[in-house]
Structures are given as C-alpha cells and as structure tokens.
Amino acid sequence: MSPDATEFDVASVLREVKMVRVEGLVRIRDLDLPLLRRAAAPRSGAVTDAWPVEVENLLRAAVARLGGGALQAAAELTVGLAPGMRDRPAADRRRLAARAYNVSVERFRKSQEEMILGQIAEQVCWLAGTGARRGPGDGPALLAPHLQHRTLHVGPIGVTLHVHPVELIRNVDVIVSPSNTHLALPEMFKASVPAALRRAGAVRDARGDVTGDPVHEELARWRRENGVTGRPVLPGTVAPTGSGALAARGIRRIYHAAVTIPRPGTNDYDVTPQDVAAAAARALALMDEERDAHTPPLRSICFPLLGAGRGGLPTQTSLSALWSALAADSAPDRRLHLVVRRPLLAELVADVLGATQQPLEPAHSTGSGEREAGCG
C-alpha cells in the first residue's frame, strides 16, 4: 500500500529528518525512520533492503525543490548531501552550513537550521502525498535520479544537457564558469557555479581539509600577468585556468567568463544578453586557440546558463543569448554540453530551444562514452 498523505504530518517527518542530520547519511541504515522509509519506497509499497539509498534519494529530491541559493546550499551541507559531506560529523556540517548564511554557528543552530529542516520535511510530505515516484511502467529506477543527462537535437546541432550540480560533471574538457568583471571567485561555501568549481577543484588532505586552492591561485596569476589586478576587465573577457583537483574527473580547463558587472555599494549585478553571447563566443574561440596545446586536443565544452544566477538574467534570455553563440560555432568536431541543476530547468531549456530529445539517462554514462568516442 502506497503512503497516504495523511500519515505524513510535518512534525513527525521533521523528527526523522533531524535524526539523519545528527547521524549523517552513512548511518541511515541504523536509524528508525518509518515515515521516510515509506515515503521513499517505490509505488508498489515494497520497502526493500535498498531502503537507505531510497531514503537518501528522497531527501535529495526534497532538497532539490528548495529553489537554490543559500537555503538549498545550507540544506545540502546540513543533511550531508553536498559533495564530501556524507560522513562528516554533524558539528562540521553545521559549521559549514552557517557559513552559507554568513552567521555564527550558534545563531544558525537556533534559527536557520530549524527553518531548513522544516522546509525539507514539508517537501518530503509533498512528495509522499503526490505519489511522485516511479511506477511499474516507468522503466528501471535510477540509483541516483538527481544525476542525469539527455541528448538534445536543435536542428543539425547535438548537445548533451546535464541535469545535476556542475561539480559532478565528468570527462568534459572545458567547463565555462560565470564570473564578475573583477574575475573574483566567491568563497568555497557559497552557492554558485564558480564557488562549486573552486570547491571541487581544491586540493584536500586525508581528513578533507583544504590544503591548496589552485583554481583561485591560477586566476589571480592570470590577472597579474594581464595587468588587471585591482581593476575590472571588459565584459565578455574569458580567463583560462587549470581545473585543480577536477582533473582527476576528466575536467582539464576552466574558462572564467566575465559576464556580470557589480553595482558599486550594493550586492547586485548588471548583465546583458550581448555580454553573455560575447563571452560564449570568446570561450569557443579560446578553446580553438588552446586546442592543440593539449593531448588529446580539447574537444568538449560545457556551459551553465551564464548570467541567470546572481546576475538576475531571466533563464530564457540567458539561454537565447548563449545559444546564439553556440549555434554559430563552425567547429565540426566540437562536443557541446549544457548544465542545469533541476529537471524543471531542463524542460525549459528543451522548450526554448525547440529541441527534440532522447530520454534521460544516468549521468555517469556520459563520461566514459565520450572518452571512447574521442570527444574529450
């Protein structure tokens, strides 16, 4: 019997979510989580021995519905869903989550943490009540349904659309990272594409502590070498760096695209579609310039929706500007990739581009297949 929405009151689910927060994802099997287990079970109602994976995927689905920003970033850290967090002690996760809100640990514990866990519990109740799980005719369940990709065809152009956090991309030669015109990277704990790439590119010791920050250091060196330390670059400028620890995942270069112009004295930015298109075109040209300096040559490149985050550009506007540059690309053997974090955005991308698409596939199949085909 599938879960009944009336059984899933927020207060009861919240108690179980708090247990996961305290013990961490690696100890889910040892916890008494009857509501989360039933909410996570397939539509048939069978709670299998794989229920800890099902509960984790349920929590990921709930957190993914929080809408990004500091709320979602802190939620991922708090529960242990962020990369490298699943076995970290609760105190470490709380400390890092507090940084996402730029508040003290004690203030976070008394205020934001309770709000975040309540939001997760509400989303779990919604998912349980809608029956938003796979049915018998929906095909094989994915072990991690938040990690997916699909192939889009926009006229004669093929593009791989990733539906997951940018730092989980594998075996794509170049990732384009949006930046402000000062080419200043945000702190690692922030919730943005450049922060995620800086975090994933950091060098860590056996305890997980950061011992090197190569992406930040290389970008600072580029600014010095190009005489722009202390002053902004022109919008559309693209600065290349190595990928740090991401090299182990098949990422060879990060192109930092200056698309947002900070407004003095505020936390706001200005961004135009023209600057997005110029940055995308410059990234493709830079890839051509660097292509044969690498072995094998650079062939695959991935773009997020430039300017659509803190820049405030509407998703459709960002995508249209970006695609104007990609569609004009004349390199026949280039492999184009886009990345969005949420499935709803993926559907919007396909609709705006008027694309035909193949069904979702597990994201891990993207990397190895591309290497075999010589795409990276």
Image: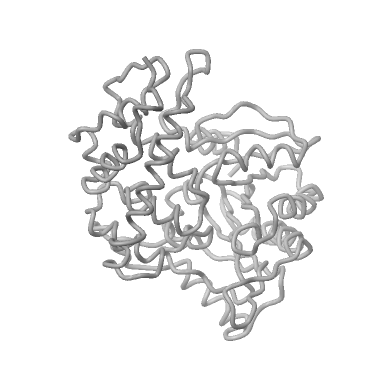
Query: For this view, does 328 lie left or right of residue 233?
Result: right
Residue at x 51% of width, y 32% of height: 365
In the image shown, does 75 or 108 lie closer to the viewer? 108
In the image shown, does 242 or 148 lie closer to the viewer? 148
Q: How many marks?
A: 0
Query: How far across and down, in percent of the image, does residue 159 sit?
Result: 68, 39
Q: Quarter holding the C terminus?
A: top right
Query: For this view, does 75 lie left or right of residue 17?
Result: right
Query: How far across and down, in percent of the image, does residue 230 sit?
Result: 58, 86
Query: How far across and down, in percent of the image, does residue 320 sit?
Result: 77, 50
Query: For this view, does 85 lie left or right of residue 316?
Result: left
Residue at x 47% of width, y 70% of height: 216
Residue at x 27% of width, y 60% of height: 205
Residue at x 26% of width, y 39% of height: 16
Q: Quarter holding the N terminus?
A: top left
In the image shown, does 239 or 258 lie closer to the viewer? 258
Query: How far across and down, in percent of the image, does residue 323 sit?
Result: 76, 49
Q: Is residue 80 above or below residue 277?
A: above
Give the colour scheme shown. Answer: one colour
Q: Is residue 349 above or below residue 193?
A: above
In the image shown, does 300 or 195 lie closer to the viewer? 195
